[in-house]
Image (cartoon, rainbow, N blue to C red):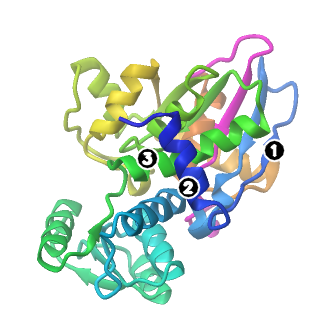
Amino acid sequence: MISHADIDQAARRTAGLIRRTPVMQADPGVFNGQVWFKCEFMQHTGTFKARGAVNRILASKERGELRTDVGIVVASGGNAGLANAYAAKQLGVPATVFVPEAAPAVKVAKLKAIGAEVVQGGAEYAAAYQAAVAHAGETGAVYCHAYDQPEIAAGAGTVGSELLEQLPDVDTVLVATGGGGLMAGVAAAVEGSAKVVAVEPEGAPTLHAALAAGEPVDVAISGVAADSLGARRVGDIGFSVAVRCGVVSVLVTDADTIKARSALWNDYRIVVEHGAAAAYAALLSGAYVPAEDERVAVILCGANTDPATL
């Protein structure tokens, strides 16, 4: 569980090490309410995950857990791996990243370019995760989860506290949700000020399924956003915060997401990955319909994509 206090602490801890990303108003008259984009795709490494990575590593250092010889370890061939490798480099410690054998070569190359040691093995993420946890136990490296750790989620939550400073009268925040770290952080940050709507692909409805079951459950994963929203189940932190804060889930199709990604490029020259476009897809598809004069912020959370596919 995370709170306002955890997010405030993360904001102080990471100050000067993460970017304050801008807010941009969408064209008026398109939707019932007023819509803004929180441009988190402009964050270091192209996603919000740099916030949680820096917070986690610095907090570990404060507790005396971070060793400069072994540094940190993470299991992810995607955004979490890039963010933690970047954060480790900025803070002067080594990073080991475990990725599945099928991890895209371009992402592996990015990780190595940042300076991480990359270990490939196993057919799926689960194998990389198990190997990373074992590595942490054997070496003393600090394990950085992709989303389900308090400091990771609290760091992500600084997106929400920053948004409230920029747009204090916001009513609703739309957040693309996979494992739930960003959703949990933002919901905790705006608790008492705004509501949060989790937007999930139909092919990866982790929170949707958990809310229906009353607990996190495994779901089958498919679809265009699976590379960034492809967690098999929502994290315990994400689920508990969602229940506490009354977060609701809406689902969008692959076609909705593809259309939204293209619209962001065609209308605003914004390039985002499919996972980030899912949040905007909720508005374009009508999965979420704002009330008249409702003030809505859409978090565009990542830009690690191939612009040639737009």
Q: Secondary structure at mark 2?
A: loop
Question: Which mark is on residue 24?
Answer: 1
First in sequence: mark 2 vs mark 3 = 2
Q: Classify the position of the N terminus by image quarter.
A: top left
Q: Classify the position of the C terminus by image quarter.
A: bottom right
Q: Is 219 inside the magenta-drawn segment? A: no
In this picture, residue 24 sits left or right of residue 305: right
Q: Nearer the viewer, mark 2 or mark 3?
A: 3
Q: Position of residue 53 (x, y in %)?
A: 45, 63
User: How many angstroms separate mark 2 from mark 3 (CA)?
Assistant: 10 Å
In this picture, residue 271 sits left or right of residue 304: right
Q: Residue at x 53, y 34 (%)?
A: 4
Q: Amino acid at mark 3?
A: Ala
Q: Residue at x 64, y 57 (%)?
A: 41
Question: Which mark is on residue 48?
Answer: 2
Dots 1 and 3: beta carbons under 8 Å?
Answer: no
Name the residue furthest top. 292
User: How many angstroms separate mark 1 from mark 3 (CA)?
Assistant: 24 Å
Q: Nearer the viewer, mark 1 or mark 3?
A: 3
Q: Amino acid at mark 1?
A: Met
User: Which residues are the magenta region?
Assistant: 288-310
Q: Position of residue 40 (x, y in %)?
A: 65, 53
Q: Secondary structure at mark 1?
A: strand
- In terms of depth relative to the viewer, which is nearer, 193 or 11? 11
Above or below: residue 223 compared with residue 227: above
Q: Nearer the viewer, mark 1 or mark 2?
A: 2
Magenta span main SS: loop
- In terms of depth relative to the viewer, which is nearer, 116 or 56? 56
